Amino acid sequence: METNANIKSIAKQKFKSNYWTTVGVCVVASIVLMITVEYTAFTNALQEMMHTEPGTISTNLSTFSFFYTIFIGNILTVGLSSFLIKNGSRAGQPEFMELFSGFKENYGNNLVTMGLRYLFIFLWALLFVIPGIIKALEYSMIPYLLADYPGLSRQEAFARSRQLMNGKKMQLFCLHLSFIGWYFLGAITFGIVNVLYTEPYVSQAEAQFYLEAKEDLYRQMQNG
């Protein structure tokens, strides 16, 4: 398995080779995935203005957030993963519309598998923060697997993600931690650096982690 330093170096090269398309894809994905957050702020403000009975709007918010995440957010994550995998492989530079591929191929399977992933991580998180983080890392490869192998069943997706992340959860956790400095720089530049560099770089690095983990598992199986 490559070191995080090498993974970041490869990811940076791949990201820069298709810079503006990658930035555009990550910006659109972030906007779509952030809608529930913006909706939360809006409904909280509306509730205060209208002096609505507590819980009325928040219940509607929870319902909206749940269905939006399941039917749109999760599927878009698969499309984003597909774009990043192709961007990081030798397949050439993917087009912007690859972001929406999760809606066009195996939508039903993507819906169920990603929905169960969302549910399991949520339930584990209820047991305290640490179990939730561990399961989030263990299931982190599922969207990449669904994008890389469109015919993969949900059972295979969960099993392969666990297999890929066996002994590598801490490395992925540390990979994300290594970008703290970039996020700090983004904060002091009012998010400009995050939009134009950090978020696409981090996203490509995680996709590269998947590609390296897959290759590492293949080598282990060949040698085993």
Image: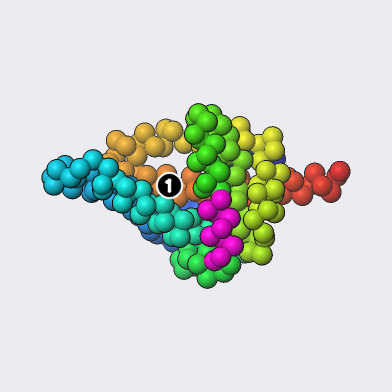
Q: In which quarter of the image is residue 24?
A: bottom left
- Using the image as rendered, state which of residue 193 and residue 135 is in the foreground: 135
- Asked if residue 112 is among those painted magenta in the image, a careful observer would answer yes
- Magenta segment, prevailing SS (helix, strand or loop): helix
* Residue, far right: 224
Q: For this view, does 6 lie left or right of residue 216?
A: left
Name the image quarter holding the N terminus.
top right
Q: What stretch is highlighted in magenta?
A: 107-116
Q: Quick check: can you spot residue 27?
A: no
Q: Where is residue 126 in the image (x, y as percent from the top left)?
A: 49, 34
Instruction: Name the residue that disc number 1 marks.
Output: 199
| Residue at (61, 40) in percent of width and height | 138
Residue at 60% over, 48% down: 141
Q: In this view, does 117 lie above or below 107?
A: above
x and y, in percent, of residue 28 in the image: 38, 58
Q: Which of 78 and 60 is in front in this view?
A: 60
